[in-house]
Image (spheres, rainbow, N blue to C red):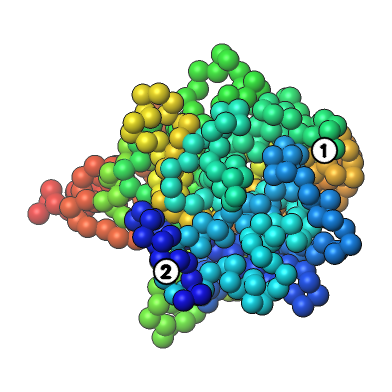
Amino acid sequence: SNIGISTMVSEARLNCMGVHHPKFMLLFEKSGSLVVTVTSSNMTDQKATDATWIQRFYPISSDTVGGGQTSSYEEVRNRCDGSDFGFVLADFLQKQSEAARLSQIIPIQFLRKFVGNIKSLDDLALKFKFSDSEVHLVSTVPGIHPGRSGSKHLSQGLRGKRILYGPQRVNDVVERLSGKVGSSSFNGHKTRPWLPPGVLSSTDRLVIQTTSLGAKWNSQYLEAVAEQYMNTNSSDLAEDDETQMIDKVDIIWPTMNLMKRIEDEYKKRFPRSRRSVSHFAFLSSQGFNESDLACASRMVFYEPTVLPQIPFTLSPHIKTYTRLLNKKVLPSCETSSSTIQNGVDSFGWIMLTSACLSRGAQGYANKMNVGCEYTSERSYLNFELGVLFVSRLQGYPESDRLYSSYSKSCSCRKDHDNRRIIKMPTPFNMRPKPYQIDPDEAEFCETPYFHMMSRKSLMTGLCSLTPFGNWFLNQKKHK
């Protein structure tokens, strides 16, 4: 059959217990353009808070050889301006194809039939003006993938092109845009780093906002993931900073009370509906107990900051990872009713993704490698896809941008220091209240939302530190 992957590929591949979790759409317009959409939303009724990124890429004219993109992948990658979007997308589609079921149409067959003039996925990467990309595409595919060590240990992707995945990809992009690794150049000329010295610091925070928490997280695993995202080998980080990396992480998670309020509001609005709206967040009480207290102590409240367009609050389903800057990047906005402190709402970068906080999505070090280089080689189980927005502070007014989440009360429209401020519509507080008010006390002031609970797990382990678990224990004592 000429449909689907070959039986040779099917027989050679290894079984992998992961999740096919990306959420994206490719729209090939009759005009010849390609519209790419990357989102956190499923193809269901809109009953959750989600986010979507979209951009149109125009076709490269036939009289322009390669449209200026005939450079090698390494040259495009070294520019690190998002131009490798097409190569990363093509590699991702190729990896999906290799995992497809027999007799299922695969991307290249679709492109040949409905788009035309495409012989391979390599052609897709060169057919559109991906050099216009405003973001960096971040993909995750199942497999064991070496990290970056110079340029010799990158995994071989589409036709030998070296592709990095997940946190490794974010680490590589940020390092290059900081001028710490390789060189950001174009046509042989070095360019100024997007994130010059002094922008990133050891006091920055990694804010993880997700809607699914995997079980059995310990401080070693979480710290390894945080080190990838926070680029700990950057010279901007202070050598005398003794703060543990895990203490720089905030994991935003909804409380039981918030999700109950969401459910009550929905039932009041739709009394005949049998469907729950709280099922968009996944953490069982048993899974919570299987994680370290050091990881659970990083949890902070999900506090909605944007009123929904419908008359009730929506359950969170959006997933973001953010490097929250702690240094002075912008002056205070004088027109705000509540003065915004310098830089508190500025982002070094922010990523919208389908990836939750699980080992399958974030990767884990192979056991054989733990004694050598823990964060170098990582194994992934899932297919995930996201887009990375990186602030650009080169000193060029026409291209500079600073991503921020200024409060809605700010009416200031002018640029600061000729920098274009892009307010990201993050629908939650970036510096919310922690579950553990006193860092020296283990008790939680609120109960995290559990989509699945058992009496036994609620009365033991970490759950016993929550108000709900403590209530169950007291009930048992009085019986």
Q: Is mark 1 on a helix, strand or loop?
A: strand
* Figure label count: 2
Query: Measured from the top left, where is residue 446 in percent x and y?
Result: 39, 48
Q: In this view, does 476 lie above or below 229?
A: below
Q: Name the residue under label 1.
A: 186
Query: Measured from the top left, where is residue 80 in percent x and y?
Result: 72, 40
Q: Which amino acid does label 2 sit on?
A: Arg
Q: What residue type is labelled 1?
A: Phe
Q: In this view, does 272 lie above or below 264?
A: below
Query: Measured from the top left, where is residue 16 in percent x and y?
Result: 36, 54
Residue visible at 74% across and 75% down?
29
| Residue 390 in sight in this render | no
Q: Which of 411 and 377 is in front in this view?
A: 377
Residue 437, by quadrant, is: top left
Would you say 458 lies left or right of 372 here?
left
Query: Measured from the top left, where is residue 43 in percent x and y?
Result: 53, 73
Residue visible at 31% across and 43% down?
216
